[in-house]
Image: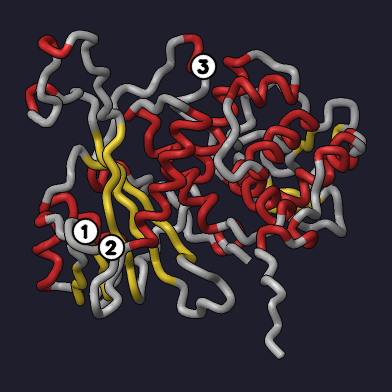
Amino acid sequence: MKNNKKKTSPLLLSALRNLSALAIYDLSDTEILILLKNARWGNSHCFHTVQCPRCQIEHKAYFISSRKQWQCKHCQHRFSVKSGTIFQHTKLSLKKLLLSVYYFTINSKGISALNLSRHIGVQYKTSWALLHKFREAVEKTQDYTPLTGIIHIDGCYVNNYLRPKNFKHKRIDRRKRCHQRKDKSCVMVFRQQATNQEIIKGADRTLVALVKEENADDMFALTHRLVAPKSTICADENPAYDGLAFHYDLCRVNHSQEYCSIDGTTNNLAESFFARFRRMIMGVYHKMGNNYMMHYATEAAWREDFRYQSDKDKFDNVLKRCLKARPSRDLTGYWQGNKKPTAKFGLESLCMEASNDSQYLAIA
């Protein structure tokens, strides 16, 4: 007799819902301080064992309980759990910071700054800068180890929509380059297919980059940096990928004729990423400038890679990344005029400050 019982999606398992906002609300100030201290320095068995952010010496420092700070025994530097991190210049309480990380991680398509401002009771400007600091921390701690195995690559054009004129005789041909938007750009994605599809269905690693358009020079440079030699690359019929055939096992699918070739070649892993990325733009963020496009693209890549992780695992991962990343130069004092100058494209769009520390980058 056939078993007609449908399989439950891994995303619906109760084991993934192991952290709630109520649990964070119930934490005392001391418990929150201990949680942040353990997430940053470890050594949960000893509260005084920390690492000085100035001299980088790990030792048992003197704790000033009235100020919630430690004093280094070697250089006499006073520091808190936020010193030297993206939280360094914020005036928000530690509980609001934890709640912000929680709301950032549990939403599959992200959370808008206006929505977060209502959850934690702050201004829109505060929540906007805080969310971008989270994205920058994820980008700075990205693992850029070259992908191996079967890699699906594709590009998605953003900031390319032009509203047509009301009267038909005033409308222009938006396909011509001279009529296109000057800030039009392309987000490139490289997705590594999981070796064991029974454990992880689809891709297990995702890397992104920003280019002005899909061209042969940028495609070769990015692929050479992000994909290991002798890997199999699945791409569409775009001629920008033709040069990759000399260095990789290149498989093509002509999307003008088919979605999947007869031999099974497809780049659906890249297409599925952009399907969710476009919905993130249309449904949550609505507008993304090129200056911070890599922040949003890296956030989408992180959400794809951690889609099967529990709420607590995702919360811990982002929190550790925030405590590892250095203070932001582009977002500190943003609303006072310190704005990111220009967008970077090609290899320059990759954040080479990224760390390979498996303690912060491991998915499991």
Q: Amino acid at mark 1?
A: His
Residue under the image location 32 percent in, 29 percent down: 290
- Observer-side mark, 2 or 3, equals 2
- Vertical arrangement, residue 34 with respect to residue 100, above or below: below
Left or right of 281? Residue 64 is right
- Counting the numbered discs, the total is 3
Q: Earlier in the sequence, mark 2 or mark 3?
A: 2
Residue 62 can be seen, yes or no:
no
Q: CA distance from mark 2 to mark 1?
A: 5 Å
Which x, y percent locates residue 238? Answer: 14, 55
Residue under the image location 42 percent in, 52 percent down: 273
Q: Which residue is mark 1?
A: 255
- Observer-side mark, 3 or 1, equals 1
Which x, y percent locates residue 347? Answer: 25, 47
Which x, y percent locates residue 215? Answer: 13, 48
Q: Amino acid at mark 2?
A: Tyr
Q: CA distance from mark 2 to mark 3?
A: 47 Å
Left or right of 60? Residue 203 is left
Q: Amino acid at mark 3?
A: Gly
**Label 2 packing within 10 angstroms: few (<14), some (14-19), many (20+):** some
Q: Which residue is mark 2?
A: 259
Task: Find out whether the residues at labels 2 and 1 contact each other: C-beta distance under 8 Å.
Answer: yes
- Vertical arrangement, residue 304 with respect to residue 286, above or below: below
